[in-house]
């Protein structure tokens, strides 16, 4: 009996040992950079700072792909700083070392190395050696079986300056797991039968170069944050022009366990189209792209009864990149239909911002059979960066001009051509942003008889980087107070600061310069429509509205269309912004309150109204009140009577009374507010996401009694549903 027990115990012990030997040994963390400092690692120089970075450092593109909260990031004090980070000695006890690595590519100056016996025996560097690129860290590994049992150290070196002069490292572990291997130029062939191929996107994943080839010829290349597994969203790639043919997709670097290529599938509709435009953070009357990212509006023109809105579009990412010209049309400036991308990156580079005109006299020769062509003028931002044109007869199909580029590179920073027909001199005028090294910013004026041959006519000197001549210039003439005999030219930059002056067909002479434009936040790079019929005569602007929509399959949007006018003030003529009248088509139910007094304890005239999308108009006489407050779905719009300042969500701006009154107009959507005050002299766009359940409006006054001589709330319907 005794023997038998012993025997059983011995057996159990043997089984236990065997099990122990079969189970994978646990990973040993060499560093996860989660602590408050580098612990026993030694940092020298400035590049790594005195402690691990908590993600992105000031001035750096968004860093992604690290684990936890911290990482070693040598962007401390920018790209020019240098330094090293060295681990304490450790024993190599597992066959593989895995780590996450990102940043600049430079095997000698930016490296992560394993040092054994004083020699570097394994080394890796980051993936980026060109402008643009990605700050995503990716998993890599070393096979260190031959060094098992030896003592070693890890050394991270940043000896590089200038662009991509930094390295990011995180989560270094010893492990028994073999890491997935990276394969180069992996291909899959598709026989195209439908409109779209759906690419799996994981926001923040390392960017992979995806090339589409037909008959061995490169059609388009994009940097895509490909998902190796389950995607955050599917990006539709329009392949309809290759229907019936075979198309090869090639990915430059792909993990061998990735399902990215195998998961790509065909379809005639975009994924998730059932809920398109109903997404929780979809602006309901602000244009946004169906999928992907937008920034600047481009090529705004009225042609054949339609307003055309092109836009800087990344069809394959939630963030900026792969600049295409997206395209949407509207008959009324309110209801937009997105038509798909019209200009895709080519050998000249990505398609940066620009404008459009109708060439009524066919000066370009790009028209046909008496039809005037629509001509797009854009920047191809490769190396060199050049100006190009493309044309269309129907507003749907566009052809790039064979004689491109039409303006060679001046400096690498020349971009965003805005073109207009100048009637008095019977020729085309282009304003082009031209930046010089040393923060010098100018606008070049060019003239052309035919949109193809351009002559430099004059230069307007820029100011500081934040000055009115930085990027995306717009240039147009307006009648002061609607008086056609008193017309002035307005030259504006991307941040909306502007100058007012005269133009002789060659040179702009400012009479007032650096006037502030809009006063809000998240408004940039607006443009105005070309070719609005003279019977209408309005100058209508749309800006990029920087409404970030985390968790959505799209990001950013456009403002509502704004009518621009010049009115006289005691300081001289000034721009005003007014929502276009067409927006009233969205009103579904209107509440008009009679004249009433507003005071601290008074009742809220808007008590009965609950709405999600709203246009509010109030005419206010301050009386002896100190403040008049309008709260719209949790957003506080407060007028400080004595200072004549308006505060929108805490952002204070000047808003003078006009004839003793303050007239406020507020548009409220799911992603932002646009507030107009002082008869349009004060326009405050404000990205803001109201709580979905807060649908209240409140109007009141404090410190005295004010009067609301009129107060209207218009509930709005979605512009998408009624298209
Ligand atoms: C402004 C801008 C333009 C450029 C475009 C690129 O937002 O930087 O100058 O053409 O965006 O997307």
Image (spheres, helix red, strand yellow):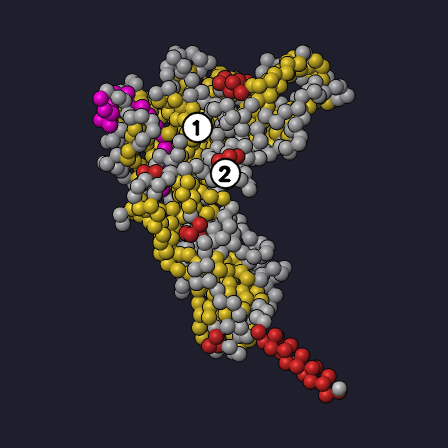
**Residue 572 place in picture, x, y as percent:** 48, 19
Find numbered disc 1 in the image and state the secondary structure of the residue it sits on.
strand
**Residue 439 place in picture, x, y as percent:** 41, 42
Where's the N terminus, which quadrant?
A: bottom right
Find numbered disc 2 in the image and state the secondary structure of the residue it sits on.
loop
The residue sitting at 46% across, 19% down in the picture is 565
* Disc 2 packing (10 Å; few <14; some 14–19; many ≥20): few
What's the mark number on residue 430? Answer: none
**Residue 340 place in picture, x, y as percent:** 39, 34
Judging by the rendered image, the residue that carries numbered circle 1 is 337
In the shown orientation, is residue 466 left or right of residue 406? Answer: right
In the shown orientation, is residue 444 left or right of residue 519? Answer: left
Q: Which residues are magenta?
A: 348-369
Judging by the rendered image, the residue that carries numbered circle 2 is 272
- CA gap between label 1 and label 2 equals 17 Å
Earlier sequence position, callout 1 versus callout 2: 2
Q: Which one is nearer the viewer's eye here, 487 or 226?
A: 226
């Amino acid at each position: 009996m005794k023997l038998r027990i012993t025997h059983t115990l011995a057996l159990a012990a043997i089984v236990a040992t065997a099990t122990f030997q079969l189970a994978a040994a646990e990973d040993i963390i060499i560093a996860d950079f989660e602590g408050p400092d580098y612990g026993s690692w030694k940092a020298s120089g400035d590049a790594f700072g005195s402690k691990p970075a908590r993600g992105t450092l000031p001035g750096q593109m968004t860093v992604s792909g690290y684990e936890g909260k911290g990482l070693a990031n040598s962007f401390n004090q920018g790209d020019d700083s240098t330094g090293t980070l060295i681990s304490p000695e450790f024993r190599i006890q597992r066959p593989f070392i895995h780590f996450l690595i990102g940043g600049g590519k430079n095997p000698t100056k930016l490296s992560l190395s394993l040092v054994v016996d004083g020699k570097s025996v394994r080394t890796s560097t980051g993936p980026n050696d060109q402008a643009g690129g990605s700050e995503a860290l990716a998993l890599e590994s070393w096979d260190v079986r031959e060094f098992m049992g030896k003592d070693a150290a890890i050394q991270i070196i940043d000896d590089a300056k200038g662009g991509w002069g930094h390295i990011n490292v995180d989560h270094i572990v010893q492990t028994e797991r073999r890491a997935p291997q990276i394969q180069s130029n992996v291909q899959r062939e598709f026989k195209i039968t439908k409109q779209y191929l759906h690419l799996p996107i994981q926001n923040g994943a390392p960017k992979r170069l995806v090339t589409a080839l037909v008959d061995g010829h490169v059609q388009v290349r994009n940097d895509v944050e490909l998902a190796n597994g389950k995607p955050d969203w599917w990006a539709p790639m329009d392949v309809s022009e290759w229907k019936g043919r075979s198309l090869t997709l090639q990915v430059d670097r792909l993990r061998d366990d990735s399902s990215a290529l195998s998961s790509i599938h065909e379809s005639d509709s975009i994924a998730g189209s059932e809920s398109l435009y109903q997404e929780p953070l979809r602006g309901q009357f602000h244009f946004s792209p169906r999928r992907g990212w937008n920034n600047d509006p481009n090529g705004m023109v009225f042609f054949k009864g339609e307003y055309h809105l092109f836009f800087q579009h990344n069809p394959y990412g939630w963030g900026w990149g792969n600049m295409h010209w997206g395209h949407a049309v509207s008959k009324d400036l309110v209801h937009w239909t997105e038509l798909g991308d019209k200009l895709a990156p080519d050998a000249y580079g990505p398609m940066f911002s620009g404008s459009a005109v109708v060439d009524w006299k066919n000066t370009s020769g790009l028209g046909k059979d008496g039809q005037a062509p629509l001509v797009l003028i854009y920047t191809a931002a490769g190396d060199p960066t050049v100006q190009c044109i493309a044309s269309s007869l129907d507003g749907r199909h566009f052809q790039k001009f064979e004689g491109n580029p039409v303006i060679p590179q001046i400096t690498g920073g020349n971009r965003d051509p805005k073109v207009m027909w100048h009637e008095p001199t019977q020729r085309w005028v282009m304003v082009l942003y031209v930046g010089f090294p040393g923060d010098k910013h100018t606008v070049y004026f060019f003239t052309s008889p035919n949109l193809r041959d351009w002559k430099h006519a004059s230069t307007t000197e820029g100011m500081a980087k934040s000055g009115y001549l930085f990027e995306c210039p717009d240039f147009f003439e307006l009648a002061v107070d609607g008086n056609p005999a008193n017309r002035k030219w307005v030259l504006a930059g991307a941040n909306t600061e502007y100058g007012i002056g005269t133009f002789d067909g060659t040179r702009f002479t400012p009479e007032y310069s650096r006037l502030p434009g809009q006063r809000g936040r998240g408004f940039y790079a607006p443009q105005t429509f070309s070719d609005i019929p003279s019977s209408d005569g309005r100058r209508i602007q749309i800006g990029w509205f920087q409404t970030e929509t985390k968790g959505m399959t799209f990001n950013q949007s456009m403002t509502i269309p704004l009518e621009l006018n010049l009115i006289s003030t005691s300081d001289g003529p000034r721009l005003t912004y007014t929502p276009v009248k067409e927006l009233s088509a969205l009103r579904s139910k209107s509440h008009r309150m009679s004249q009433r007094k507003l005071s601290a304890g008074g009742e809220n005239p808007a008590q009965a109204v609950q709405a999600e999308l709203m246009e509010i108009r109030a005419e206010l006489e301050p009386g002896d009140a100190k403040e008049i407050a309008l709260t719209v779905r949790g957003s506080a719009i407060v007028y400080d009577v004595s200072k004549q300042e308006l505060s929108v969500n805490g952002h204070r701006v000047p808003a003078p009374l006009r004839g003793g009154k303050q007239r406020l107009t507020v548009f409220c959507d799911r992603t932002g507010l646009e507030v107009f005050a002082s008869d349009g002299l004060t326009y405050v766009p404000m990205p803001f996401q109201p709580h979905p359940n807060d649908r209240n409006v409140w109007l009141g006054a404090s410190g005295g009694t004010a009067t609301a001589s009129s107060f209207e709330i218009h509930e709005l319907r979605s512009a998408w549903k009624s298209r």
